[in-house]
Image (tube, rainbow, N blue to C red):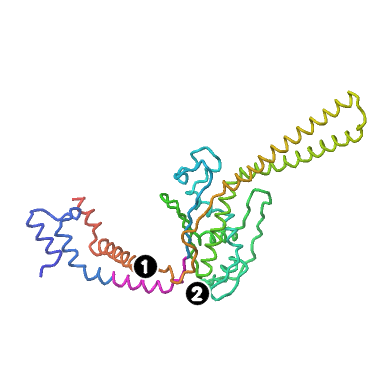
Amino acid sequence: MISYPEKKAEVAESTGSTFNASEVRFIDIILFIRKYIKMLILVTIASVIGGVLYSFTLPKKYEARVSLLPEYGGPKRGSFSLLGAGLTGDGAEKLQPELYPTIMQSSPFGEYLLKQPVVDQENKSYKTLLDFMRAQQKPGLLSRLFSSSPKAPKKEIKLKKEGILSYSLQEQSQIAGAIALLSAEVDPKSGVIDISAETLDPFVSAILVEAAEKYLVDYVEDYRSSKASQREGLLSDRVKEAKARLRTAEYALQSYRDQNRNIFSNTAKIEEQRLQAEYVLAESLYSDLVRRYEQAKVNVKEERPVFKVLEPVKVPLLKSSPKRLRIGLISGFLGGFFTILYILLFKEKVIQKIVSGANR
């Protein structure tokens, strides 16, 4: 049987030229595969088995999910209002559904999650999600072996000013960890919002999804109805002022009539007419403000979007990760890839042959 180097020499002699490693022929590939096929197969199989075995060391995680479909009220919104939000010029319309996942990546949302009470599948209650996360953090063997004596924590100074968030490094890490448990996706065609949470406990995953759903719905409702709510509050204050003005005008008119009941002078009649006009004006203003106030309350309800639950939150029964087959396939691919690199660089020394061929 002719070996691989001898075969290359025969090919070079038959063509009447020396072998150039930079020129790869089809016969070279066939001979390369025949020579190292066993090694590639063995390494790939071993990598797949190793990846599957490694997956058994990973903790099991459970994913809970909910699907929402937002519906918006108001006469200005048509069937394409969900996709065309922000194009009408209305400030409330600018919160497009595509921005909903961004809301769930904010620091206030992370703080909100950390404060949620949870219960695990063993019916053990935790006051907050932060307590549950701390209970799940078990130091590994290497960390216990190489851990040094605990140092006194460095005092961190926080800025206390309204509108500015100031966190310590530990708090930032905890908030980032809570946010990483949740994910949200929006289908641009149907507008369906999928919210999912993946944790080490199926009950905790379901509780977090429900909490995230409530936060998102409240946030969007508050944003969209904020303008109408401000108008309602402004009209409410004006209605109170108009009502007080009406009572004052009515009291002044009735008091004047009681004091001047038997007086028929023109001066008294003029004053009574003036008080009567003031009362009519106050009554008209009060009636108009009440009408506008009631309409503003209706507008607030119309501005609030209605979220229909397409798929309710369910406690997951099967684990979502680790996915052993996927890990095994990825490990096998990486094992085969690095084996080919090792053969080319160290066995066949392709780079050296390319350099030597270029110098000839």
Q: Residue at x 59, y 62 (%)?
A: 114
Q: Which residues are magenta?
A: 44-63
Type of amino acid at the residue the image marks with label 2: Leu
Q: Which image quadrant for residue 60?
A: bottom left
Q: Which image quadrant for residue 284?
A: top right
Name the one closer to the observer, 164 or 277.
Answer: 277
Instruction: Decide if residue 163 is on the left or right side of residue 177.
Output: right
How far across and down, in percent of the image, does residue 234 sit?
A: 68, 41
Q: Nearer the viewer, mark 2 or mark 1?
A: 1
- Which quadrant of the rendered structure holds the N terminus? bottom left
Instruction: Say which element carries label 2.
Output: helix
How far across and down, in percent of the image, does residue 50 sit?
A: 35, 72
Instruction: Decide if residue 283 is on the left or right side of residue 358.
Output: right
Instruction: Decide if residue 310 is on the left or right side of residue 12.
Output: right
Q: Residue at x 25, y 64 (%)?
A: 343
Tag 2 residue: 141
Type of amino acid at the residue the image marks with label 1: Ile
Tag 1 residue: 327
Mark 2 → mark 1, Cα distance in angstroms? 23 Å
What residue occupies the far bottom of the structure in this picture?
A: 122
Name the one closer to the observer, 173 or 226.
Answer: 226
Q: Is residue 165 magenta?
A: no
Where 133 sits versus 222, above or below? below
Q: Which mark is residue 357?
A: none
How far across and down, in percent of the image, does residue 281 sit?
A: 75, 32
How far across and down, in percent of the image, does residue 185 sit?
A: 45, 55
The crowd level at tag 1 (other Cα within 10 Å; few <14, some 14-19, many 20+) is many
Q: Residue at x 83, y 31 (%)?
A: 275
